Image (tube, rainbow, N blue to C red):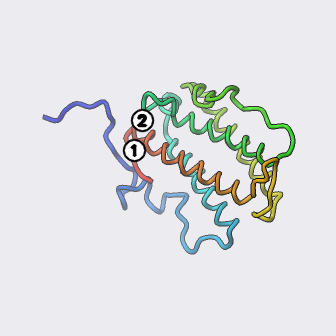
Amino acid sequence: MKPMSDQPARWSQATVHPDMWADPDDDPRDSQGAGPDGELATLQDFLTNYRITLRMKCEGLDAEQLARRSVPPSTMSLLGLVRHLAEVERDWRNWITDGDPLPKLYGRRDADFDGAVADQAVVDAAYADLEREQAATDAALARYADLGERVGKDGTSVRELLVHRIEEYARHCGHADLLRECVDGRVGQ
């Protein structure tokens, strides 16, 4: 007799490669041919693909599932990750400026995760915040053609900031893999 478990069964939508999230023809990140030319285009391509990956990991879930803290005692949830990345996109603009820092989106420390509650209005606001903050940070960085240019009070290079953004999304996409699997058992890269 098979033991009962509260854990969802593992599954993938993919049929070609069962360890993948989606079949290659259905994966918006799957591009045929050579990658982009140049350092900036390559960095932007990686960032775009990680942004898409985060969205994919959240697709098809309701507000309760997105807000579910799947790995207790962690406060991390998929919705919390969306809110957190909106917050850090805003904070990265603080690295660029010499002026006063932008205020936190969600208030005190960890409010991005603590405020990730099962409410569709919170979900909708989180996605709107993320899109707005991504666009604003992209626009702020687009003003710098030289990736070696040093910006802000700390003299951070534009290259370092772009690589740090990729690292942040990549790390949190790894978290999203595990969180999603705990929510409904869906697996894949």
Numbered mark located on residue 88 in the image: none
Indicate the secondary structure of the residue bearing disc 1: loop
Where in the figure is residue 76, as x and y percent of width and height? 51, 33
Position of residue 105 in the picture relative to residue 175 (left or right): right
Disc 2: CA contacts within 10 A as few (<14), some (14-19) or many (>=20): many
In which quadrant is the C terminus drawn? bottom left
User: Is 75 positioned to the left or the right of 7 in the image?
Assistant: right
Q: Residue furthest right?
A: 99
Q: In this view of the protein, which residue sits in the foreground, 82 or 171? A: 171
Among all residues in the image, which is located at the extreme left?
1
In the displayed structure, does residue 18 sit left or right of residue 175?
A: left
Residue at the spot x=80%, y=57% of the render? 150
Which residue does the numbered mark 1 point to in the structure image? 186
Which of the two residues, 140 or 68, is positioned nearer the viewer here?
140
Q: Find residue 121 and report its horizontal and vertical position in percent.
A: 63, 27
Q: Are marks 2 and 1 in contact (CB under 8 Å)?
A: yes
Q: Type of residue at label 1?
A: Arg
Q: Quadrant of residue 156?
A: bottom right
> Label 2, on which residue?
183
- Of residues 169 and 157, the one drawn nearer to the viewer in this rendering: 157
- Which residue is rendered at x = 80% and y = 37% of the image? 101
Determine the CA span between mark 2 and mark 1: 8 Å
Quarter of the rendering occupied by the N terminus:
top left
User: What residue lies at 64% left-to-right and 70% top-to-bottom?
Assistant: 36
Tell me where residue 107 appears, x and y as whole percent: 70, 26
Amino acid on which the number 2 mark rests in the picture: Val
